[in-house]
Amino acid sequence: MTTGLWYVIGFAFAGATFVLITIIASWLLSHRSRGDRHKGMPYESGIDTYGYTWGRTGLSFYIYALLFVAFDIEVVFIYLWAIVFRDVLLGGFLAMLLFVVILLIGLGYAWRKGVLTWK
Amino acid sequence: MSVITRPWNRLSLAGKIILPLFLLLVLLTVLLIAGWQIGVIPGLIEIVADLVRSNIDIFRFIGTATVTLLITIPVAFVIIYMEMKVIAFLASRIGPNRIGPWGTLSSVFHGFKVLAKEDFTPTGADAAVFTMAPIITYLSSVLTLLVIPFAPGLVGLDMNIGLLYFFAVSGLTVVGLLTAGWSSFNKYSLIGGLRAAAQIVSYELPLLLAPVGIIMLAGTLSLNQIVIKQAGWFWDWYVFQQPLAFIVFFIAATAEGNRTPFDLTEADSEIVAGFATEYSGMRFGFFFFAEYVNVFILSALTVVLFFGGWNSPINAQEVLNFLHIGSLTPNLDISTLGIWLLWILVFGVPIILLLIALPLWLLKSSWSFVKSLIVAFVLFNVLAVAAFMVWAFLSFEVVVGLIWFLAKVFTFVFIFVWMRGTLPRVRIDQLMGFAWKWLVEIALLNVFITAGAILLLQELNR
């Protein structure tokens, strides 16, 4: 098992090195110029940037993220349940059905509250 | 001095390249023979073999990492070429046709072009995060290649939690795109990054829930085992037992890969280029590199889960048994040929060359003999490679598996490109609503249908 972990870590390291080396090689190959003030400005369709970009942003779909967390935990359980399903059979089936139905009631509540419709 | 320089200057560019190479080759040959005679080279081989044997794990890792990282480059080039050519044909255009035969090399030159472009960081951007974002995006797609079984025995790491690992790592794409959007200091980038987060997070759920039925049928999370369970005829593939799951999975995979009709994150008619607006040069290149690798990986996962991975659609063993043939493998033992092998190699090749060249020369009166010889040489090489491939296909399970796997994967890549050439982009609220109102429910329904069916079969068999 630890071999697998070292594989993943080592592979991530190798991949990051590959990307960095390519970016550095491209940086050395290509021409660069600082340019004037306008070159560094964000491209917003030719208009000078207005307001502060890293300020507060309105998001219509932040509740999706909350729903996602709930359902993602469910996925972790359902995966484990699926592997051993042939051992638990009817009892496991009913237990998981109950669990999913409770979650779906939660989703239905969010749906009724208008979370899933665009405002 | 001019005795040496004058003939050198008369050479053409090709001659200037070939002559040193030829001299180097002669020198190497002489050194090799001398080294072999003295006994230096066998000793060196023994030392290297000892080193490899004692550190087999490290060398296996280095091999896996190198192959897996480098295989992404040709894969991306092929997909970019397909994207240009297939969409051109869908739009009744010719497409790239300048560089290489049928424009096949144009995607490679695109790559070199991006490498040589200026890589600019905007003044307002957070430079460190700005550089980190393409690295994370690329890593999250390339790390998943580690668990995909390409052929029997040809898998980077046969993890027992392969599927879970796959989804865990590919979920990191969100981090990459969100940091890219945020660090650019551009409102379009920010909107693109936030859209990416919302979209990928929402479609993660159907993508995760669709294979649950397959996990129940296979009883394992290891991708290698899932493929082995689908061996046999093509109706043993899980797509025929889980059609609903396949539809959900494929739609969710399209959204996960940010492909049209779900490419809201870089919708060029709405938000310039989304998260990639401020990127240029190689850092921009890596986002698209990652996207094409993602297309390949999602196709590969679809094939592994639903279309039998490296299994051929025909059960060759049963067909052979039906026809009363023992085995197709040619019984070729080179060692019995002995000295004749040398004679075949020395005289066989020129004889076959002449056999191809003479009819060409006689039929095409305008060709000189040298030209027909060159054409014959090219033809001979093509034929030899084809014969070698056929022999390898018949003899090695790995080659058969790899060819079937790649054929299936590139069929799905073609479908992804086809969709991009055909379908219009959906609206963002439709996109988000579709995942939560339809796909999640259908995927859960599929899970319980599968579970019910397994229960029922268990009861009937008792």
Image (cartoon, rainbow, N blue to C red):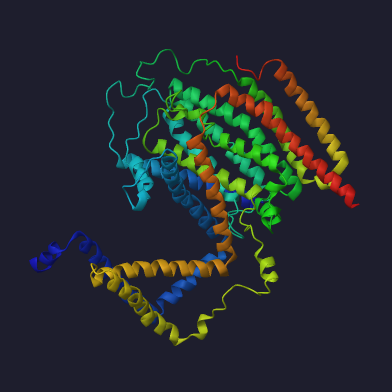
Q: Which residue lies at the image location 53% right of the left edge and 55% below the top edge?
A: B64
Residue A105 versus residue A14 in the image, above or below: above
Q: Which residue lies at the image location 71% right of the left edge and 33% below the top edge?
A: B442
Which residue is farthest bottom? B339
User: Left or right: B298 with respect to B14?
Assistant: right
Residue B116 versus residue A54 in the image, above or below: below
Residue A4 in sight in this render: yes
- In depth, the one of B23 and B334 nearer the eye is B334
User: In the rendering, at what x and y percent does residue A11 appear?
Assistant: 53, 48
- In depth, the one of B14 and B417 nearer the eye is B417
User: In the rendering, at what x and y percent does residue A80 appear?
Assistant: 75, 42
Q: Which residue lies at the image location 51% right of the left edge and 30% below the top edge?
A: B424
Residue B2 versus residue B62 in the image, above or below: below
User: Left or right: A67 with respect to B125?
Assistant: right
Q: Which residue lies at the image location 65% right of the left edge and 37% below the top edge?
A: B248
Which residue is farthest top? A51
* Quadrant occupied by the N terminus of chain B: bottom left
Residue A7 in sight in this render: no
